[in-house]
Image (tube, rainbow, N blue to C red):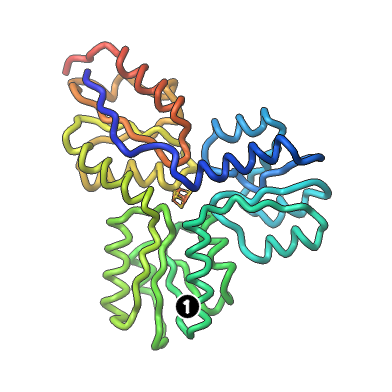
């Protein structure tokens, strides 16, 4: 079975920055250090940080996590946090360090700027992910709405003259186009700001292009990782090939490769390269399974 390494894959600049910040802090900050939520969405990274003495406190509600910390330092994740969370950390006397990706910071700035200019924000993203919570926390709650799918657009009743469409950085390029088109059909005055980051766009484009030439694609990434899950979806929906998300080599199932001669491998932006390398080596050792 031929194993094709899809490029680009793996760590993006935002993840590298966040991990470096956390590792540096572990080396010189005194007292306990807590990551508020997963620093980046990958179990292997979180385990590595734990070995370095950083306690990663995970959960849906980051404010509750913060309230549970009574001393020491906190690191805010690459996905960004709301100003309210930052303010609360200061109020509680915690030292805080911000590992927000610069691409996410840009979306925060844009959301504030657009609302100041009188726009209403339609933010295309995934409910429950920390990034929308941070971006939407930048603006008054009555000046923005989260849009997850075309059905949400159908339910809108807006009379705003100025509407700005913003997007989460790690969602599907194609899904976003469909949702933005639905918004424009109802509100032609809406202004589009595509905030899907370059790392996400490049990984999705490569996965679709190379995925088309493969029988199966394996995406190495964590189930919590938005960009990893989107890679699976875009291969299935745009390259029309089976795609499977695995956290590591142990999750690979031989039954996926019946009659397969060419398998593509890509990985999410928060997946360590050594984990992807182990998956590739495992696939190279798999015996061909005849159809
Ligand atoms: S996937 Fe994009 S937004 Fe997320 S950390 Fe990487 S560069 Fe930043």
Label 1 crowd bin: few (<14), some (14–19), many (20+), radius 10 Å: some
Q: Is residue 272 above or below residue 112?
A: above
- Looking at the image, which is closer to me, 289 or 204? 204
Q: Is residue 237 above or below residue 127?
A: above
Image x and y of residue 140, in percent: 58, 76
**Snapshot quadrant of residue 40:** top right
- Horizontally, residue 38 falls left or right of residue 2, namely right
- Horizontally, residue 51 falls left or right of residue 4, namely right
All told, the count of numbered labels is 1
Residue at image x 26%, y 47%?
205
- Looking at the image, which is closer to me, 204 or 14? 14
- Looking at the image, which is closer to me, 12 or 151? 12
Image x and y of residue 213, in percent: 16, 34
Q: Is residue 138 above or below residue 70?
A: below
Figure quadrant of the N terminus: top left
Residue at image x 48%, y 70%?
110
Residue tagged by mark 1?
114
Image x and y of residue 199, in percent: 38, 48
SS at circle 1: helix
Figure quadrant of the C terminus: top left
Image x and y of residue 289, in percent: 22, 15
Residue at image x 81%, y 58%?
92
Q: In this view, does 104 lie above or below 6?
A: below
Determine whether the beta carbon of the residue marked 1 sits less than 8 angstroms from the nearest atom of ligand 1: no
Residue at image x 64%, y 41%?
22
């Amino acid at each position: 079975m031929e194993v094709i390494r899809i490029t680009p894959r793996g760590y993006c600049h935002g993840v590298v920055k966040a991990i470096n910040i956390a590792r540096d802090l572990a080396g010189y900050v005194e007292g306990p250090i807590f990551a508020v939520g997963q620093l980046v969405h990958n179990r292997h990274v979180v385990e590595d940080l734990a070995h370095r003495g950083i306690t990663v406190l995970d959960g849906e509600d980051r404010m509750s996590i913060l309230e549970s910390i009574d001393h020491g330092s906190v690191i805010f994740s690459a996905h960004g946090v709301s100003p309210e969370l930052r303010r609360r950390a200061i109020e509680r006397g915690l030292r805080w360090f911000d590992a927000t990706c610069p691409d996410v910071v840009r979306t925060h700035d844009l959301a504030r700027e657009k609302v100041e200019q009188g726009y209403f924000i339609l933010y295309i993203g995934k409910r429950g992910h920390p990034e929308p919570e941070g971006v939407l926390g930048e603006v008054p709650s009555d000046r923005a709405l989260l849009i997850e799918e075309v059905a949400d657009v159908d339910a809108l009743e807006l009379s705003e003259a100025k509407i700005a469409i913003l997007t989460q950085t790690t969602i599907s390029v194609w899904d976003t186009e469909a949702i933005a088109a639905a918004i424009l059909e109802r509100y032609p005055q809406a202004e589009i700001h595509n905030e899907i980051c370059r790392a996400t766009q490049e990984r999705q484009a490569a996965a679709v292009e190379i995925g088309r030439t493969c029988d199966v694609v394996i995406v190495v990434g964590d189930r919590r990782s938005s960009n990893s899950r989107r890679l699976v979806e875009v291969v299935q929906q745009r390259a029309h090939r089976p795609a499977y998300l695995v956290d590591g080599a142990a999750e690979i199932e031989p039954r996926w490769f019946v009659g397969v001669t060419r398998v593509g491998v890509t990985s999410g932006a928060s997946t360590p390269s050594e984990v992807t390398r182990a998956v590739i080596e495992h696939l190279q050792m798999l015996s061909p399974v005849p159809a």
